[in-house]
Amino acid sequence: MVSVSDLFLLNPKSELEDNMKVGFIPMALVEDGFSGNHFYEERTWKDVKRGYCHFQNGDIGIAKISPCFENRKSTIFKNLPNTYGAGTTELVILRPIKVYTKFYLYLFKSDWYVKEGTKYFKGVVGQQRVHKEIFTDLHIPLPPFAEQQRIVEEIEYWFALIDQIEQDKSDLQTAIRQTKSKILDLAIHGKLVPQNPNDEPASELLKRINPKAEITCDNGHYPQLPDGWCKCRLEDIVEYEQPQAYIVNSTDYDDRYLTPVLTAGKSFVIGYTNETEGIYQNTPCIIFDDFTTDSKLVDFPFKVKSSAMKILKVADDIEIEYVAMFMNITRLIGDTHKRYWISEYSKLCIPIPPKEEQKRIINAANAMFEKLDAIMESL
């Protein structure tokens, strides 16, 4: 066992021509985790030679400030312009002396080293840094050079295998999302469940809901509607409410609070509030992002983050889950930042099956989704 200072030169300085191009690396350009990657900005040496650390290709840089140290922001510098660089002084630079650099980079990223390193923190919470004593007092292993190489080969073999597993997992998740989208597409085209000629035609259903609705049984988007189906505009079966009365007053969220604060985007639940007034209770409903046309089905009380949405209520005789399925795969993507519900989205045609078939579609789709979700959860 030896100290780091026995194996590396600490924070060496460079003497270069002022007009030389070098790489400049702030902390943000050093990746955390185990990749060891970094990026750089090209600078002139005279602009960065003072007030920054110096390094060259082959040196190791280790973040000394918390939480960058714990997040394993460390790298071996490579492909620098003219082989030299400068960067944030929150990096400790180690220049190797006859050791296999990759081995020690992995060692510095190990749980053992990070845990030991936190014992050398100095400073107040939020501005703690690893004290330089870690490089003189903490002893680290020194295997034979050939063994250092073998260890790195083994580590990188397993890392490559893990990366492949992660890629396969990502590919499967993508396939599952595509399968769900296809299920919804089949559902709204009448191809997910068989039709029953004894079901009341959807046209009769729509006449009761909205006698003024423009109802047809054929159109350009859905040229072959199944028997008993028809189509209408979303606005014929959906009413909207502006969300201003339900906007949260404070963004001091806490998971211990009871009422979720929602957005119609990917994040959906962005936090929880303890506010007791202005809670939307008339669920189930659909929340609709007026700018992105994302939507979510909601069946619990909530508040909202902003006015950039509509709260949608579907007519009682139409299954809201069916409308949510249609909206889930029907998005409008525009080049301008505008609101879509009133001007365009509510005018879209939606194919409507008979009431009983709507229920069969929902049950079939949910059964398939449960199986796909089980696969996702097992990954």
Image (cartoon, grey):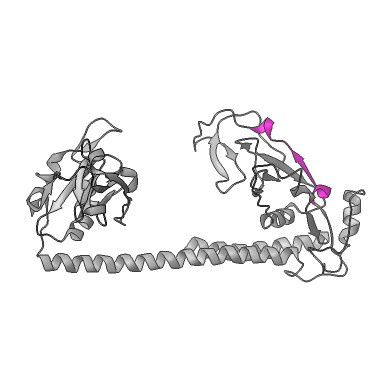
Viewer-proximal residue, 354 or 152? 152
Q: Is residue 46 left or right of residue 145?
A: right
**Which quadrant holds the N terminus?**
bottom left
Would residue 238 be counted in the magenta stretch?
A: yes
Q: Position of residue 94 (x, y in %)?
A: 16, 49
Residue 101, quarter of the rendered image: bottom left
- Span shown in magenta: 234-247
Q: Is residue 186 left or right of residue 101?
A: right
Q: Position of residue 228 (x, y in %)?
A: 86, 65
Residue 153, quarter of the rendered image: bottom left
Q: Position of residue 106 (x, y in %)?
A: 23, 57
Viewer-proximal residue, 227 or 96? 96
Q: Position of residue 239 (x, y in %)?
A: 79, 43
Q: Is residue 168 left or right of residue 16?
A: right
Residue at image coords 46%, 65%:
169
Viewer-proximal residue, 342 or 353? 342
Viewer-proximal residue, 166 or 271? 166
Residue at image coords 19%, 66%:
151
Would residue 363 be counted in the magenta stretch?
A: no
Indicate whether 323 appears above or below 147: above
